[in-house]
Image (cartoon, rainbow, N blue to C red):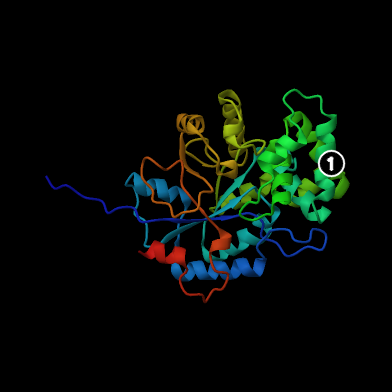
Amino acid sequence: MTTVTRPPVPPVTIVMYHFIRPASKRFPGFAAIEPAAFREQLRYILRHHTPIRLTDVADAVNGSTMLPPRPVVLTFDDGYREHYDRVFPLLAEHGIFGAFFAARSALVNRRVLGANKVQFVLAAAGNTDSIIESIDLALGRSRVAGTGSAAEYRARWWVPSRFDNAAVTYAKRMLQHGLPEDVREPTLDALFQRYVTSDEAAFAEELYFTAAEAREMRSAGMEFGGHGDRHVPLPSLDAQTQALEIDASIDSLETIGAPRTPFLYCYVKGEHDATSLALLRARGCATAVTTREDLARPTSDNLLTLPRLDTTVLPVDGNASPSEWTRKAIA
């Protein structure tokens, strides 16, 4: 009896995208890749890599398919309108099947995600002084149990991050997860109304693609996966609430005609814990992606914790020589 030895699964470059839009006078300094730069980056990727589906990764691990040399998967988080208006036509033109991850509250309920509120507030305000003043006032007024002092929060969160100075990092972290929920949500909503708009529903329609548009994309071969319900990092929740977050996300996949199982998943902020993994496995998740920066080296043990590269680490010149990450993929 001849034993067939399958070749090892090659490293997979999984690229992570969020906003792909032109610079805006209304929101100066907003972090996004320009559409022209995205087109050039796509040209670079097609010169040096072979696009595959995210589902192909799990299929390669279980032996039902083989991956080409230097495979690449393009993933798009949060369900932004430009993913339908700009990205989808370009991918379809080149025969690429991207993977899209939209939170249920944005896709189905048409609510602006808290993380997006923070982004647009910071972009519209122009500086953090008034935002931090609002946070300090909210702390001073709070009667919510467990609320710390401004000094305690600053000692923890007033530190620079990879992309932001200490003041911006502090404002982001406090409004995203640092403040108790009963303090954070009304503070962020007041800032959003002050700096961005009082019509959240209209803003959500401008910001996110619709379920009908997602069904159109899916019928053209695009992949969709879960990205939570309220776009909350799973480890910040207890096991029961993690399950509710994941189940609501799976419900949203069914809304657009995607299968409940096996399904794809994208962790909010890349964060997960042992409970998250157990819940996803129990529900038939095939592949899940994080935000950890690395090439994916898929095995049966790590299909639910695959790393990704941010768009910023790849060239936006279609004629560029292979980058460091591309050379690693070739090796």
* Residue at 77% in and 51% down: 122
- Coordinates of residue 32 in the picture (x, y in percent): 68, 60
- Coordinates of residue 253 in the picture (x, y in percent): 59, 39
* Residue at 77% in and 48% down: 205
Tally of marks: 1
- Coordinates of residue 111 in the picture (x, y in percent): 75, 40
Left or right, residue 44 beside residue 32: left
- Coordinates of residue 155 in the picture (x, y in percent): 68, 40
Q: Quadrant of residue 243?
A: top right
Residue 48 in view (yes/no)? yes
Nearer to us in this view, 3 or 89: 3
Query: Please, what is the three-letter code of the amino acid marked with disc 1?
Result: Ser
Nearer to us in this view, 249 or 215: 249
Left or right, residue 128 beside residue 45: right
Q: Residue furthest bottom?
A: 319
Q: Quadrant of residue 88?
A: bottom right
Question: The N terminus is located in which quarter?
Answer: top left
Left or right, residue 318 beside residue 79: left
Q: Which residue is mark 1?
A: 134
Question: The C terminus is located in which quarter?
Answer: bottom left
Is the residue 324 above or below the residue 74 in the image? below
Q: Quadrant of residue 177?
A: top right
User: Neighbour class for label 1 at 10 Å: few (<14), some, many (≥20)?
Assistant: some
Residue 107 in view (yes/no)? no
Q: Secondary structure at mark 1?
A: helix
